[in-house]
Protein backbone atom coordinates (compact mmCIF):
# COMPACT_ATOMS: atom_id res chain seq x y z
CA UNK A 1 0.00 0.00 0.00
CA UNK A 2 2.77 2.36 0.92
CA UNK A 3 4.60 1.44 -2.29
CA UNK A 4 1.55 2.25 -4.39
CA UNK A 5 1.15 5.60 -2.64
CA UNK A 6 4.81 6.46 -3.31
CA UNK A 7 4.51 5.54 -6.98
CA UNK A 8 1.35 7.63 -7.27
CA UNK A 9 3.12 10.65 -5.73
CA UNK A 10 6.03 10.24 -8.13
CA UNK A 11 3.56 10.07 -11.02
CA UNK A 12 1.85 13.29 -9.90
CA UNK A 13 5.21 15.05 -9.49
CA UNK A 14 6.27 13.95 -12.97
CA UNK A 15 3.01 15.33 -14.43
CA UNK A 16 3.62 18.67 -12.66
CA UNK A 17 7.15 18.85 -14.03
CA UNK A 18 6.01 18.00 -17.57
CA UNK A 19 3.16 20.51 -17.38
CA UNK A 20 5.62 23.22 -16.39
CA UNK A 21 7.95 22.46 -19.31
CA UNK A 22 6.21 23.44 -22.49
CA UNK A 23 7.80 25.16 -25.43
CA UNK A 24 6.37 28.13 -27.33
CA UNK A 25 4.16 25.82 -29.41
CA UNK A 26 2.47 24.62 -26.23
CA UNK A 27 3.82 21.08 -26.56
CA UNK A 28 5.23 19.45 -23.46
CA UNK A 29 8.91 18.54 -23.53
CA UNK A 30 10.91 15.91 -21.74
CA UNK A 31 11.81 17.37 -18.31
CA UNK A 32 15.30 15.88 -18.46
CA UNK A 33 16.42 17.75 -21.59
CA UNK A 34 18.64 20.86 -21.48
CA UNK A 35 15.79 23.03 -22.77
CA UNK A 36 13.41 21.89 -20.03
CA UNK A 37 16.04 22.64 -17.41
CA UNK A 38 16.59 26.10 -18.92
CA UNK A 39 12.88 26.92 -18.77
CA UNK A 40 12.84 25.99 -15.09
CA UNK A 41 15.96 28.08 -14.49
CA UNK A 42 14.35 31.10 -16.17
CA UNK A 43 11.29 30.81 -13.93
CA UNK A 44 13.51 30.59 -10.86
CA UNK A 45 15.82 33.52 -11.67
CA UNK A 46 13.45 36.03 -13.31
CA UNK A 47 10.99 37.57 -10.86
CA UNK A 48 8.31 38.83 -13.28
CA UNK A 49 5.62 36.83 -15.05
CA UNK A 50 6.01 38.48 -18.45
CA UNK A 51 6.00 36.27 -21.59
CA UNK A 52 9.12 34.17 -21.96
CA UNK A 53 11.70 35.25 -24.59
CA UNK A 54 11.45 32.24 -26.87
CA UNK A 55 13.93 33.76 -29.32
CA UNK A 56 16.52 33.20 -26.56
CA UNK A 57 15.21 30.00 -24.97
CA UNK A 58 15.02 28.32 -28.40
CA UNK A 59 18.80 28.69 -28.64
CA UNK A 60 19.08 26.04 -25.92
CA UNK A 61 20.85 22.80 -26.74
CA UNK A 62 18.72 20.43 -28.87
CA UNK A 63 20.22 17.35 -27.15
CA UNK A 64 17.65 14.83 -26.01
CA UNK A 65 17.79 13.38 -22.51
CA UNK A 66 19.92 10.36 -23.48
CA UNK A 67 22.38 12.43 -25.50
CA UNK A 68 22.57 14.97 -22.69
CA UNK A 69 23.57 12.26 -20.23
CA UNK A 70 26.10 10.71 -22.64
CA UNK A 71 27.91 13.90 -23.62
CA UNK A 72 27.85 15.28 -20.08
CA UNK A 73 29.90 12.24 -19.09
CA UNK A 74 32.20 12.46 -22.13
CA UNK A 75 32.89 16.17 -21.50
CA UNK A 76 34.74 15.18 -18.35
CA UNK A 77 37.24 13.24 -20.46
CA UNK A 78 38.40 15.46 -23.30
CA UNK A 79 40.13 12.63 -25.17
CA UNK A 80 36.91 10.62 -25.21
CA UNK A 81 34.89 13.63 -26.35
CA UNK A 82 37.39 14.34 -29.15
CA UNK A 83 36.89 10.80 -30.49
CA UNK A 84 33.15 11.47 -30.69
CA UNK A 85 33.40 15.06 -31.92
CA UNK A 86 31.62 14.42 -35.22
CA UNK A 87 28.49 12.96 -33.61
CA UNK A 88 28.66 15.53 -30.79
CA UNK A 89 28.74 18.42 -33.25
CA UNK A 90 25.85 17.00 -35.22
CA UNK A 91 23.65 16.21 -32.21
CA UNK A 92 24.36 19.48 -30.37
CA UNK A 93 24.09 21.71 -33.48
CA UNK A 94 27.64 23.03 -33.27
CA UNK A 95 29.94 24.64 -35.83
CA UNK A 96 32.60 22.04 -36.66
CA UNK A 97 34.72 21.43 -39.72
CA UNK A 98 34.75 18.00 -41.35
CA UNK A 99 37.86 15.85 -41.18
CA UNK A 100 39.03 15.58 -44.78
CA UNK A 101 41.14 12.49 -45.47
CA UNK A 102 43.88 12.42 -48.08
CA UNK A 103 42.97 11.64 -51.67
CA UNK A 104 45.08 8.89 -53.15
CA UNK A 105 43.41 9.07 -56.55
CA UNK A 106 45.72 9.39 -59.55
CA UNK A 107 44.92 11.60 -62.49
CA UNK A 108 47.00 10.81 -65.58
CA UNK A 109 45.26 13.20 -67.92
CA UNK A 110 43.62 16.59 -68.05
CA UNK A 111 40.71 16.90 -65.65
CA UNK A 112 37.82 19.32 -65.41
CA UNK A 113 36.00 19.53 -62.09
CA UNK A 114 32.52 21.10 -62.15
CA UNK A 115 30.23 21.65 -59.15
CA UNK A 116 32.71 19.85 -56.90
CA UNK A 117 32.61 19.89 -53.09
CA UNK A 118 35.03 19.53 -50.14
CA UNK A 119 38.09 17.51 -51.03
CA UNK A 120 41.72 16.95 -50.17
CA UNK A 121 43.88 16.73 -53.29
CA UNK A 122 47.19 15.11 -52.31
CA UNK A 123 50.04 14.84 -54.77
CA UNK A 124 47.80 16.01 -57.59
CA UNK A 125 49.12 16.66 -61.06
CA UNK A 126 52.79 16.15 -60.25
CA UNK A 127 55.18 16.19 -63.20
CA UNK A 128 52.39 16.59 -65.73
CA UNK A 129 53.63 17.64 -69.20
CA UNK A 130 51.60 20.53 -70.54
CA UNK A 131 47.82 19.97 -70.47
CA UNK A 132 45.09 21.80 -68.62
CA UNK A 133 43.08 21.36 -65.41
CA UNK A 134 39.92 23.32 -64.71
CA UNK A 135 37.96 23.80 -61.48
CA UNK A 136 34.58 25.44 -62.16
CA UNK A 137 31.91 26.24 -59.58
CA UNK A 138 34.00 24.44 -56.99
CA UNK A 139 32.40 24.25 -53.50
CA UNK A 140 29.62 26.62 -54.53
CA UNK A 141 27.25 27.80 -51.77
CA UNK A 142 28.84 25.33 -49.38
CA UNK A 143 28.51 25.72 -45.63
CA UNK A 144 31.85 25.17 -43.88
CA UNK A 145 33.80 24.12 -47.00
CA UNK A 146 37.22 22.63 -46.23
CA UNK A 147 39.49 22.08 -49.22
CA UNK A 148 43.16 21.23 -49.31
CA UNK A 149 45.49 21.08 -52.30
CA UNK A 150 48.83 19.48 -51.37
CA UNK A 151 51.76 19.04 -53.76
CA UNK A 152 49.55 20.34 -56.53
CA UNK A 153 51.06 20.63 -60.01
CA UNK A 154 54.55 20.01 -58.60
CA UNK A 155 57.32 19.73 -61.16
CA UNK A 156 54.99 20.14 -64.13
CA UNK A 157 56.17 21.40 -67.49
CA UNK A 158 53.99 23.93 -69.28
CA UNK A 159 50.90 22.76 -67.40
CA UNK A 160 47.98 25.18 -67.03
CA UNK A 161 45.58 25.39 -64.08
CA UNK A 162 42.40 27.39 -63.98
CA UNK A 163 40.16 28.03 -60.96
CA UNK A 164 36.90 29.77 -61.95
CA UNK A 165 34.15 30.77 -59.53
CA UNK A 166 35.97 28.91 -56.79
CA UNK A 167 34.16 28.53 -53.44
CA UNK A 168 31.63 31.32 -54.02
CA UNK A 169 29.12 32.29 -51.34
CA UNK A 170 30.78 30.00 -48.79
CA UNK A 171 30.25 30.35 -45.07
CA UNK A 172 33.34 30.05 -42.82
CA UNK A 173 35.64 28.85 -45.60
CA UNK A 174 38.90 26.97 -44.99
CA UNK A 175 41.07 26.53 -48.12
CA UNK A 176 44.69 25.46 -48.25
CA UNK A 177 47.16 25.38 -51.15
CA UNK A 178 50.41 23.73 -50.03
CA UNK A 179 53.44 23.21 -52.25
CA UNK A 180 51.55 24.55 -55.26
CA UNK A 181 53.33 24.74 -58.59
CA UNK A 182 56.70 24.13 -56.94
CA UNK A 183 59.83 22.57 -58.32
CA UNK A 184 60.87 24.19 -61.56
CA UNK A 185 57.49 24.09 -63.25
CA UNK A 186 58.62 25.27 -66.65
CA UNK A 187 56.19 27.63 -68.28
CA UNK A 188 52.46 27.31 -67.91
CA UNK A 189 49.78 29.55 -66.47
CA UNK A 190 47.87 29.47 -63.18
CA UNK A 191 44.69 31.49 -63.22
CA UNK A 192 42.49 32.20 -60.22
CA UNK A 193 39.39 34.02 -61.42
CA UNK A 194 36.47 35.06 -59.21
CA UNK A 195 38.08 33.19 -56.33
CA UNK A 196 36.09 32.94 -53.08
CA UNK A 197 33.68 35.84 -53.78
CA UNK A 198 30.99 36.77 -51.26
CA UNK A 199 32.34 34.42 -48.59
CA UNK A 200 31.91 34.83 -44.87
CA UNK A 201 34.92 34.52 -42.53
CA UNK A 202 37.42 32.83 -44.85
CA UNK A 203 40.76 31.33 -43.91
CA UNK A 204 42.79 30.97 -47.10
CA UNK A 205 46.41 29.78 -47.08
CA UNK A 206 48.93 29.65 -49.91
CA UNK A 207 52.14 28.00 -48.64
CA UNK A 208 55.28 27.45 -50.70
CA UNK A 209 53.43 28.75 -53.74
CA UNK A 210 55.24 28.78 -57.09
CA UNK A 211 58.65 28.42 -55.47
CA UNK A 212 61.57 27.80 -57.85
CA UNK A 213 59.45 28.05 -60.97
CA UNK A 214 60.66 29.10 -64.39
CA UNK A 215 58.68 31.37 -66.69
CA UNK A 216 55.32 30.67 -65.10
CA UNK A 217 52.58 33.29 -64.91
CA UNK A 218 50.22 33.59 -61.93
CA UNK A 219 46.99 35.57 -62.31
CA UNK A 220 44.61 36.40 -59.46
CA UNK A 221 41.48 38.20 -60.72
CA UNK A 222 38.62 39.27 -58.47
CA UNK A 223 40.15 37.45 -55.50
CA UNK A 224 37.98 37.33 -52.33
CA UNK A 225 35.82 40.23 -53.45
CA UNK A 226 32.98 41.29 -51.14
CA UNK A 227 34.35 39.11 -48.35
CA UNK A 228 33.34 39.45 -44.71
CA UNK A 229 36.05 39.16 -42.06
CA UNK A 230 38.66 36.41 -42.19
CA UNK A 231 42.30 36.09 -43.20
CA UNK A 232 44.50 35.20 -46.17
CA UNK A 233 48.14 34.29 -46.12
CA UNK A 234 50.76 33.89 -48.85
CA UNK A 235 53.96 32.31 -47.48
CA UNK A 236 57.13 31.77 -49.47
CA UNK A 237 55.37 33.00 -52.60
CA UNK A 238 57.39 33.09 -55.82
CA UNK A 239 60.66 32.47 -53.98
CA UNK A 240 63.78 31.77 -56.06
CA UNK A 241 61.71 31.96 -59.23
CA UNK A 242 63.07 32.76 -62.67
CA UNK A 243 61.04 34.94 -65.03
CA UNK A 244 57.80 34.45 -63.09
CA UNK A 245 55.10 37.11 -63.50
CA UNK A 246 52.43 37.61 -60.85
CA UNK A 247 49.37 39.75 -61.42
CA UNK A 248 46.88 40.51 -58.64
CA UNK A 249 43.81 42.34 -59.95
CA UNK A 250 40.89 43.34 -57.73
CA UNK A 251 42.34 41.64 -54.67
CA UNK A 252 40.21 41.69 -51.48
CA UNK A 253 38.20 44.66 -52.76
CA UNK A 254 35.01 45.68 -50.98
CA UNK A 255 35.92 43.40 -48.10
CA UNK A 256 35.03 43.81 -44.46
CA UNK A 257 37.76 43.37 -41.82
CA UNK A 258 40.05 41.22 -43.92
CA UNK A 259 43.62 40.30 -43.00
CA UNK A 260 46.24 39.55 -45.66
CA UNK A 261 49.80 38.44 -45.03
CA UNK A 262 52.50 38.12 -47.69
CA UNK A 263 55.70 36.54 -46.28
CA UNK A 264 58.86 35.98 -48.30
CA UNK A 265 57.05 37.25 -51.39
CA UNK A 266 59.18 37.31 -54.52
CA UNK A 267 62.33 36.73 -52.48
CA UNK A 268 65.47 36.26 -54.58
CA UNK A 269 63.35 36.26 -57.71
CA UNK A 270 64.99 36.79 -61.11
CA UNK A 271 63.21 38.63 -63.89
CA UNK A 272 59.44 38.51 -64.10
CA UNK A 273 57.62 41.15 -62.09
CA UNK A 274 54.71 41.71 -59.75
CA UNK A 275 51.68 43.94 -60.18
CA UNK A 276 48.96 44.62 -57.63
CA UNK A 277 45.98 46.45 -59.13
CA UNK A 278 43.06 47.67 -57.06
CA UNK A 279 44.37 45.92 -53.95
CA UNK A 280 42.21 46.22 -50.85
CA UNK A 281 40.11 49.08 -52.24
CA UNK A 282 36.88 50.09 -50.52
CA UNK A 283 37.79 47.78 -47.64
CA UNK A 284 36.65 48.19 -44.07
CA UNK A 285 39.37 47.93 -41.39
CA UNK A 286 41.82 45.88 -43.48
CA UNK A 287 44.98 44.46 -41.90
CA UNK A 288 47.72 43.84 -44.49
CA UNK A 289 51.25 42.70 -43.82
CA UNK A 290 54.07 42.40 -46.38
CA UNK A 291 57.26 40.82 -44.98
CA UNK A 292 60.45 40.30 -46.95
CA UNK A 293 58.81 41.54 -50.14
CA UNK A 294 61.08 41.54 -53.16
CA UNK A 295 64.19 41.10 -50.99
CA UNK A 296 67.40 40.37 -52.94
CA UNK A 297 65.27 40.23 -56.06
CA UNK A 298 66.18 40.98 -59.67
CA UNK A 299 62.67 41.71 -60.91
CA UNK A 300 62.25 44.55 -63.40
CA UNK A 301 59.25 46.04 -61.60
CA UNK A 302 57.10 45.96 -58.46
CA UNK A 303 53.88 47.92 -58.94
CA UNK A 304 51.00 48.71 -56.58
CA UNK A 305 48.19 50.52 -58.42
CA UNK A 306 45.16 51.84 -56.57
CA UNK A 307 46.24 50.29 -53.28
CA UNK A 308 43.83 50.56 -50.33
CA UNK A 309 41.84 53.28 -52.09
CA UNK A 310 38.85 54.62 -50.15
CA UNK A 311 39.39 52.12 -47.35
CA UNK A 312 38.23 52.73 -43.82
CA UNK A 313 40.80 52.66 -41.01
CA UNK A 314 42.89 49.47 -40.82
CA UNK A 315 46.63 48.95 -40.77
CA UNK A 316 49.34 48.00 -43.27
CA UNK A 317 52.86 46.92 -42.56
CA UNK A 318 55.73 46.64 -45.06
CA UNK A 319 58.91 45.06 -43.65
CA UNK A 320 62.08 44.73 -45.73
CA UNK A 321 60.35 45.92 -48.90
CA UNK A 322 62.49 45.88 -52.08
CA UNK A 323 65.55 45.65 -49.84
CA UNK A 324 68.86 45.46 -51.73
CA UNK A 325 67.20 44.86 -55.09
CA UNK A 326 69.07 44.56 -58.35
CA UNK A 327 67.75 47.01 -60.93
CA UNK A 328 64.09 47.61 -61.58
CA UNK A 329 61.40 49.94 -60.17
CA UNK A 330 59.11 49.89 -57.17
CA UNK A 331 56.07 52.03 -57.75
CA UNK A 332 53.04 52.87 -55.58
CA UNK A 333 50.29 54.70 -57.45
CA UNK A 334 47.25 56.06 -55.64
CA UNK A 335 48.36 54.53 -52.34
CA UNK A 336 46.44 54.92 -49.13
CA UNK A 337 43.75 57.36 -50.20
CA UNK A 338 41.83 56.12 -47.18
CA UNK A 339 38.37 57.28 -46.23
CA UNK A 340 39.03 56.71 -42.53
CA UNK A 341 42.58 57.14 -41.34
CA UNK A 342 44.53 54.01 -40.51
CA UNK A 343 48.25 53.45 -40.11
CA UNK A 344 51.03 52.22 -42.36
CA UNK A 345 54.52 51.23 -41.33
CA UNK A 346 57.42 50.86 -43.74
CA UNK A 347 60.57 49.30 -42.21
CA UNK A 348 63.73 48.96 -44.28
CA UNK A 349 61.99 50.25 -47.40
CA UNK A 350 64.26 50.42 -50.41
CA UNK A 351 67.41 50.44 -48.30
CA UNK A 352 70.53 49.59 -50.21
CA UNK A 353 69.17 50.61 -53.59
CA UNK A 354 71.34 52.40 -56.09
CA UNK A 355 70.98 55.67 -57.98
CA UNK A 356 69.93 53.71 -61.05
CA UNK A 357 66.78 52.51 -59.37
CA UNK A 358 63.51 54.31 -58.79
CA UNK A 359 60.99 54.14 -55.99
CA UNK A 360 57.88 56.22 -56.54
CA UNK A 361 54.75 57.21 -54.62
CA UNK A 362 51.92 58.98 -56.45
CA UNK A 363 48.85 60.34 -54.67
CA UNK A 364 50.04 59.06 -51.33
CA UNK A 365 48.41 59.94 -48.04
CA UNK A 366 48.14 58.05 -44.76
CA UNK A 367 49.40 58.31 -41.19
CA UNK A 368 52.72 56.61 -41.79
CA UNK A 369 56.17 55.78 -40.45
CA UNK A 370 59.21 55.13 -42.65
CA UNK A 371 62.32 53.51 -41.14
CA UNK A 372 65.64 52.88 -42.91
CA UNK A 373 64.22 54.54 -45.97
CA UNK A 374 66.15 54.95 -49.23
CA UNK A 375 65.55 58.69 -49.31
CA UNK A 376 67.91 59.72 -52.09
CA UNK A 377 66.21 57.99 -54.98
CA UNK A 378 62.55 58.38 -54.11
CA UNK A 379 59.87 60.36 -55.88
CA UNK A 380 56.69 61.50 -54.13
CA UNK A 381 53.86 63.09 -56.10
CA UNK A 382 50.81 64.65 -54.40
CA UNK A 383 51.96 63.58 -50.92
CA UNK A 384 49.81 64.67 -48.02
CA UNK A 385 52.80 65.76 -45.93
CA UNK A 386 55.84 67.19 -47.70
CA UNK A 387 58.37 66.45 -44.95
CA UNK A 388 59.77 63.52 -46.91
CA UNK A 389 63.37 64.28 -45.93
CA UNK A 390 62.69 63.01 -42.41
CA UNK A 391 63.59 59.47 -41.53
CA UNK A 392 60.15 59.14 -39.93
CA UNK A 393 57.26 60.76 -41.76
CA UNK A 394 53.83 61.23 -40.19
CA UNK A 395 50.90 62.78 -41.96
CA UNK A 396 47.20 63.14 -41.37
CA UNK A 397 44.75 62.11 -43.99
CA UNK A 398 42.97 65.00 -45.61
CA UNK A 399 39.36 63.88 -45.36
CA UNK A 400 37.02 64.26 -48.26
CA UNK A 401 33.71 65.29 -46.71
CA UNK A 402 31.89 64.30 -49.87
CA UNK A 403 33.38 60.81 -49.93
CA UNK A 404 31.02 57.88 -49.67
CA UNK A 405 32.20 54.83 -47.83
CA UNK A 406 30.21 51.70 -48.49
CA UNK A 407 31.05 50.32 -45.07
CA UNK A 408 29.14 53.04 -43.29
CA UNK A 409 25.87 51.49 -44.35
CA UNK A 410 22.91 53.88 -44.59
CA UNK A 411 20.81 53.62 -41.47
CA UNK A 412 23.43 51.77 -39.44
CA UNK A 413 23.68 54.79 -37.13
CA UNK A 414 21.08 57.49 -36.67
CA UNK A 415 20.01 60.28 -34.34
CA UNK A 416 17.39 59.86 -31.64
CA UNK A 417 15.07 62.37 -33.31
CA UNK A 418 14.54 59.88 -36.14
CA UNK A 419 12.53 57.61 -33.81
CA UNK A 420 9.25 59.42 -34.39
CA UNK A 421 6.06 58.16 -35.96
CA UNK A 422 6.02 58.84 -39.69
CA UNK A 423 9.78 59.14 -40.16
CA UNK A 424 11.07 57.44 -43.31
CA UNK A 425 14.65 56.25 -43.00
CA UNK A 426 16.98 53.61 -44.44
CA UNK A 427 17.42 50.38 -42.53
CA UNK A 428 20.77 48.55 -42.65
CA UNK A 429 21.17 44.86 -43.30
CA UNK A 430 20.41 43.44 -39.85
CA UNK A 431 20.54 39.81 -40.93
CA UNK A 432 22.78 37.49 -38.96
CA UNK A 433 25.69 36.33 -41.17
CA UNK A 434 27.10 33.80 -38.71
CA UNK A 435 26.51 30.03 -39.00
CA UNK A 436 23.53 28.70 -37.07
CA UNK A 437 24.52 27.13 -33.75
CA UNK A 438 23.06 26.35 -30.35
CA UNK A 439 24.28 26.91 -26.81
CA UNK A 440 25.76 24.02 -24.92
CA UNK A 441 24.11 23.07 -21.63
CA UNK A 442 25.94 24.73 -18.77
CA UNK A 443 26.94 21.38 -17.27
CA UNK A 444 28.80 20.48 -20.50
CA UNK A 445 30.19 23.96 -21.30
CA UNK A 446 31.62 24.27 -17.79
CA UNK A 447 33.74 21.14 -18.34
CA UNK A 448 35.34 22.37 -21.58
CA UNK A 449 38.41 24.63 -21.65
CA UNK A 450 37.52 28.26 -22.27
CA UNK A 451 40.64 30.45 -22.21
CA UNK A 452 43.56 31.32 -24.47
CA UNK A 453 45.86 29.44 -22.11
CA UNK A 454 43.92 26.27 -22.95
CA UNK A 455 43.63 26.86 -26.69
CA UNK A 456 45.72 23.79 -27.51
CA UNK A 457 43.25 21.61 -25.59
CA UNK A 458 40.34 23.17 -27.47
CA UNK A 459 42.07 22.52 -30.79
CA UNK A 460 42.54 18.89 -29.84
CA UNK A 461 38.88 18.46 -28.90
CA UNK A 462 37.57 20.07 -32.10
CA UNK A 463 40.25 18.60 -34.42
CA UNK A 464 41.60 22.05 -35.36
CA UNK A 465 45.03 22.43 -36.93
CA UNK A 466 47.28 25.27 -35.82
CA UNK A 467 46.75 27.17 -39.07
CA UNK A 468 43.08 26.29 -39.46
CA UNK A 469 40.07 28.57 -39.51
CA UNK A 470 38.66 26.72 -36.52
CA UNK A 471 41.80 27.35 -34.47
CA UNK A 472 41.95 31.03 -35.38
CA UNK A 473 38.24 31.46 -34.80
CA UNK A 474 38.46 30.09 -31.25
CA UNK A 475 41.62 32.06 -30.47
CA UNK A 476 40.15 35.34 -31.71
CA UNK A 477 36.94 34.90 -29.71
CA UNK A 478 38.77 34.05 -26.49
CA UNK A 479 41.22 36.91 -26.94
CA UNK A 480 38.32 39.34 -27.20
CA UNK A 481 36.70 37.74 -24.15
CA UNK A 482 39.88 38.28 -22.14
CA UNK A 483 40.36 41.88 -23.27
CA UNK A 484 40.28 44.39 -20.43
CA UNK A 485 36.96 46.24 -20.22
CA UNK A 486 36.69 49.78 -21.52
CA UNK A 487 36.20 52.69 -19.13
CA UNK A 488 32.87 52.21 -17.33
CA UNK A 489 32.21 48.85 -18.99
CA UNK A 490 31.31 45.63 -17.19
CA UNK A 491 31.72 42.65 -19.51
CA UNK A 492 31.58 38.89 -19.61
CA UNK A 493 31.59 36.21 -22.27
CA UNK A 494 28.84 33.69 -21.62
CA UNK A 495 28.77 30.19 -23.10
CA UNK A 496 25.37 29.13 -21.80
CA UNK A 497 21.98 30.79 -21.49
CA UNK A 498 22.17 30.25 -17.74
CA UNK A 499 25.40 32.29 -17.62
CA UNK A 500 23.75 35.06 -19.65
CA UNK A 501 20.82 35.16 -17.22
CA UNK A 502 23.21 35.29 -14.25
CA UNK A 503 25.31 38.12 -15.68
CA UNK A 504 22.34 40.23 -16.74
CA UNK A 505 20.55 39.87 -13.40
CA UNK A 506 23.78 40.63 -11.52
CA UNK A 507 23.89 44.00 -13.29
CA UNK A 508 20.19 44.88 -13.51
CA UNK A 509 18.43 42.78 -10.90
CA UNK A 510 15.91 39.99 -11.40
CA UNK A 511 12.99 42.07 -12.71
CA UNK A 512 14.28 42.25 -16.30
CA UNK A 513 13.20 41.79 -19.90
CA UNK A 514 15.39 40.75 -22.83
CA UNK A 515 14.45 42.05 -26.26
CA UNK A 516 15.56 41.77 -29.87
CA UNK A 517 14.27 42.98 -33.21
CA UNK A 518 11.43 40.67 -34.24
CA UNK A 519 12.66 39.71 -37.73
CA UNK A 520 14.82 41.01 -40.57
CA UNK A 521 12.12 42.52 -42.78
CA UNK A 522 12.98 46.02 -43.97
CA UNK A 523 16.70 45.26 -44.19
CA UNK A 524 18.61 47.17 -46.87
CA UNK A 525 15.61 49.31 -47.77
CA UNK A 526 13.62 52.31 -46.65
CA UNK A 527 11.23 51.89 -43.74
CA UNK A 528 8.64 54.03 -42.00
CA UNK A 529 8.58 54.35 -38.21
CA UNK A 530 5.20 53.48 -36.69
CA UNK A 531 4.32 53.69 -33.01
CA UNK A 532 7.30 54.22 -30.69
CA UNK A 533 7.63 53.34 -27.02
CA UNK A 534 10.49 54.37 -24.76
CA UNK A 535 11.46 51.62 -22.31
CA UNK A 536 11.19 52.82 -18.71
CA UNK A 537 9.34 55.86 -19.97
CA UNK A 538 12.21 56.84 -22.28
CA UNK A 539 14.42 57.67 -19.29
CA UNK A 540 18.18 57.32 -19.36
CA UNK A 541 18.87 53.87 -17.95
CA UNK A 542 21.37 51.02 -17.90
CA UNK A 543 21.16 47.98 -20.14
CA UNK A 544 23.10 44.83 -20.95
CA UNK A 545 23.74 44.17 -24.62
CA UNK A 546 24.83 40.76 -25.88
CA UNK A 547 26.51 40.11 -29.23
CA UNK A 548 27.46 36.81 -30.84
CA UNK A 549 31.04 35.62 -31.06
CA UNK A 550 32.17 33.14 -33.69
CA UNK A 551 32.85 29.92 -31.79
CA UNK A 552 31.96 26.22 -32.27
CA UNK A 553 28.96 26.65 -29.97
CA UNK A 554 27.04 29.81 -29.14
CA UNK A 555 29.07 32.29 -27.14
CA UNK A 556 27.90 35.83 -26.47
CA UNK A 557 29.94 38.86 -25.52
CA UNK A 558 27.73 40.66 -22.99
CA UNK A 559 28.49 44.07 -21.52
CA UNK A 560 26.70 46.65 -19.48
CA UNK A 561 25.98 49.86 -21.34
CA UNK A 562 25.49 52.87 -19.03
CA UNK A 563 23.55 55.98 -19.99
CA UNK A 564 21.33 54.69 -22.75
CA UNK A 565 17.72 55.00 -23.80
CA UNK A 566 16.04 51.92 -25.21
CA UNK A 567 13.11 52.07 -27.63
CA UNK A 568 10.79 49.62 -29.32
CA UNK A 569 9.12 50.71 -32.53
CA UNK A 570 6.78 49.27 -35.12
CA UNK A 571 8.45 49.21 -38.52
CA UNK A 572 6.16 49.84 -41.49
CA UNK A 573 6.38 49.42 -45.22
CA UNK A 574 6.68 53.03 -46.44
CA UNK A 575 4.32 52.39 -49.36
CA UNK A 576 1.54 50.24 -47.91
CA UNK A 577 1.99 51.48 -44.29
CA UNK A 578 1.58 47.83 -43.22
CA UNK A 579 3.55 46.66 -40.19
CA UNK A 580 6.42 44.42 -41.26
CA UNK A 581 8.62 44.31 -38.17
CA UNK A 582 8.96 45.35 -34.54
CA UNK A 583 12.38 46.84 -33.94
CA UNK A 584 14.46 47.41 -30.82
CA UNK A 585 16.76 50.44 -30.91
CA UNK A 586 19.30 51.61 -28.37
CA UNK A 587 20.53 55.20 -28.13
CA UNK A 588 23.90 55.85 -26.49
CA UNK A 589 23.60 59.18 -24.70
CA UNK A 590 27.27 59.45 -23.69
CA UNK A 591 29.71 58.92 -26.57
CA UNK A 592 32.62 60.82 -25.02
CA UNK A 593 34.79 57.69 -24.73
CA UNK A 594 34.28 56.61 -28.35
CA UNK A 595 37.10 56.95 -30.86
CA UNK A 596 37.09 59.89 -33.26
CA UNK A 597 37.18 57.48 -36.23
CA UNK A 598 34.12 55.54 -35.07
CA UNK A 599 31.83 54.83 -38.01
CA UNK A 600 28.97 56.64 -36.28
CA UNK A 601 30.81 59.96 -36.45
CA UNK A 602 31.81 59.40 -40.06
CA UNK A 603 28.17 58.69 -40.89
CA UNK A 604 26.59 61.44 -38.80
CA UNK A 605 29.29 64.08 -39.09
CA UNK A 606 30.23 64.80 -35.49
CA UNK A 607 32.63 63.68 -32.79
CA UNK A 608 32.94 61.98 -29.40
CA UNK A 609 30.68 63.41 -26.69
CA UNK A 610 28.98 65.87 -29.03
CA UNK A 611 25.96 63.79 -30.06
CA UNK A 612 23.98 60.73 -29.03
CA UNK A 613 24.14 57.75 -31.40
CA UNK A 614 21.36 55.22 -32.01
CA UNK A 615 21.31 51.85 -33.77
CA UNK A 616 19.01 48.88 -34.19
CA UNK A 617 19.52 45.59 -32.39
CA UNK A 618 20.46 43.14 -35.16
CA UNK A 619 19.16 39.62 -35.67
CA UNK A 620 20.24 37.25 -32.87
CA UNK A 621 21.76 40.09 -30.82
CA UNK A 622 19.76 41.26 -27.81
CA UNK A 623 19.54 43.86 -25.08
CA UNK A 624 18.42 43.42 -21.47
CA UNK A 625 16.72 46.20 -19.50
CA UNK A 626 14.56 46.66 -16.43
CA UNK A 627 10.98 45.52 -16.93
CA UNK A 628 8.36 48.25 -17.28
Image (cartoon, rainbow, N blue to C red):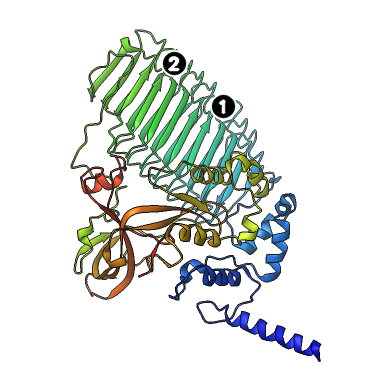
- Residue placed under numbered mark 2 in the picture: 323
Q: Is residue 381 visible?
A: yes
For residue 387, above or below residue 534 = above
For disc 1, the neighbor class at 10 Å (few under 14, some 14 to 19, many from 20) is: many
Q: Is residue 626 left or right of residue 95?
A: left
For residue 117, above or below residue 312 = below
Mark 2–mark 1 Cα distance, whole angstroms, equals 19 Å
Q: Residue 293 got which mark?
A: none
Residue in the picture at 37% in, 14% down: 373
Residue toward you, 206 or 49: 49
For disc 2, the neighbor class at 10 Å (few under 14, some 14 to 19, many from 20) is: many
Q: Position of residue 67 (x, y in %)?
A: 69, 66
Q: Position of residue 490 (x, y in %)?
A: 43, 49
Residue in the picture at 64% in, 60% down: 443
SS at mark 2 in the image: loop
Residue in the picture at 42% in, 47% down: 227
Amino acid sequence: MHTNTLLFCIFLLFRVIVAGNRDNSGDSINPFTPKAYLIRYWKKQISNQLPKPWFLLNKASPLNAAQFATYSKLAGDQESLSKEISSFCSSANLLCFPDISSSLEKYGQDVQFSSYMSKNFTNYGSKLPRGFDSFKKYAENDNLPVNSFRQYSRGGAGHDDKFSTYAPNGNVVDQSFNTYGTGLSAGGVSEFKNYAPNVNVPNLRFTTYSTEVAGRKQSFTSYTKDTNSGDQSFTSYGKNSNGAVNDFTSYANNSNVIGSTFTNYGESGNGGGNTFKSYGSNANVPENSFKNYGVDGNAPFETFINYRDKSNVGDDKFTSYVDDPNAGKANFENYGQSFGEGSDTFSKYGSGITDAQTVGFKTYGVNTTFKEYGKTVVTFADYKNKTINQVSVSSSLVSDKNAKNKWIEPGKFFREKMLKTGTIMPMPDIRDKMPKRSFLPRVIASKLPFSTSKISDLKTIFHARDDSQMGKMMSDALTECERSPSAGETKRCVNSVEDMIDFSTSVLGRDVVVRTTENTKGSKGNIMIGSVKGINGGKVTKSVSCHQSLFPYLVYYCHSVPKVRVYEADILDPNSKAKINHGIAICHVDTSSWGANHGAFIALGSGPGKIEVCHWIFENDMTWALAD
